[in-house]
Image (cartoon, helix red, strand yellow):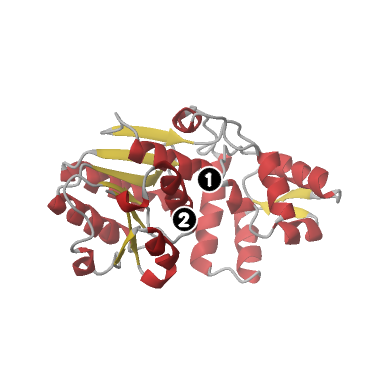
Amino acid sequence: MYVVTGATGQLGRLVVEGLLAAVPASEIAVVVRSAAKAEEWAKQGVRVHEADYSRPETLAGAFAAGDRVLLISGNEFGSRVSQHGAVIDAAKAAGAALLAYTSILGTATFRLGDEHKATEELLLASGLPYALLRNGWYTENYLGDVAGTVERGVVLGSAGEGRVATAARKDYADAAVAVLVGAGHENRVYELSGDVAWSLSELAAELSEASGKPVAHRDVPPAEHREVLVGAGMPEGFADVFVDVDAGIARGELAGTPGDLARLIGRPTVPLADSVRAALNA
């Protein structure tokens, strides 16, 4: 079986869609917190297992010998190492053939990467055959409020002219599918990023061109960046994460373009301009 944990999240849904296009539904299983959210897959023949990363006992029966598992990282900062460890332990006990984990680029030193690196250590220590999918930044991270950004006419950040080699979420999902259904990916590490690195100034220019409205890049000190994010309603903890990541971008930690992602998916990654236009037309 091909097993996807956290399958009803934004990345997980794209992975399951990719698997459904590649293998019979009867060969796919999903591990989700709410079975109701996976009802449409169950109707197609996908096996649904309801479990919570924070309750290890619910993972009993989620995996079986020979399964190829994708562990999609959780979103509960501060709790993820123990949560991921529970999944790794359950997969090992069941005799899984492969566990692929959505990690973070090896060049990242900002705090968001700490739990990913700790999870990698747990996975390597487990003895399970592994694949580390070290995902870079998603282009969608910058386009969640694209209409508002255009209306305000400002792309705000504290990364200076640091560059970030983003890729579309679907690019990363397609890579995960390729590793799950493909051969020869055991005990491999993939540094996944977009083909082209760009700056926030270039993002502003793309937004201007695509929308026909003036959009400028405004770089601010980290403290002011945090203040703006919190003032806009972002929880303080998340604001700290975003500002810290911008500091990493300024250091060049998300700018690498090793090409692993394009090679895995067999095509170029989605260009920034295409993602911008898709977001504006959504």
Q: In the image, is 215 to the left or to the right of 4?
A: right
- Picture quadrant of residue 229: bottom right
Residue at point 35% right, 57% down? 46
Q: Position of residue 209 (x, y in %)?
A: 82, 43
**Looking at the image, residue 194 lies above or below residue 157:** above
**Looking at the image, residue 239 lies above or below residue 161:** below
**Looking at the image, residue 159 lies above or below residue 86:** above
**Residue 206 vs residue 68, the one in the foreground:** 68
Q: Position of residue 211 (x, y in %)?
A: 82, 50
Q: Mark 2: which amino acid?
A: Arg
- Figure quadrant of the C terminus: bottom right
Q: Mark 1: which amino acid?
A: Lys
**Residue 230 vs residue 196, the one in the foreground:** 196
Residue at point 26% right, 33% down? 187
Per the rendering, the mark at residue 13 is 2
Q: In the image, is 229 to the left or to the right of 114?
A: right
Q: Is residue 256 visible?
A: yes
Q: Position of residue 136 (x, y in %)?
A: 49, 42
Q: In the image, is 185 to the left or to the right of 89?
A: right
SS for callout 2: helix
Give the distance between the C-alpha atoms of the residues marked 2 and 1, in whole angstroms: 10 Å
**Looking at the image, residue 138 lies above or below residue 9:** above
**Residue 114 vs residue 144, the one in the foreground:** 144
N-terminal of the pair, mark 2 or mark 1, is 2
Question: Would you name the residue on which mark 1 appears?
Answer: 170
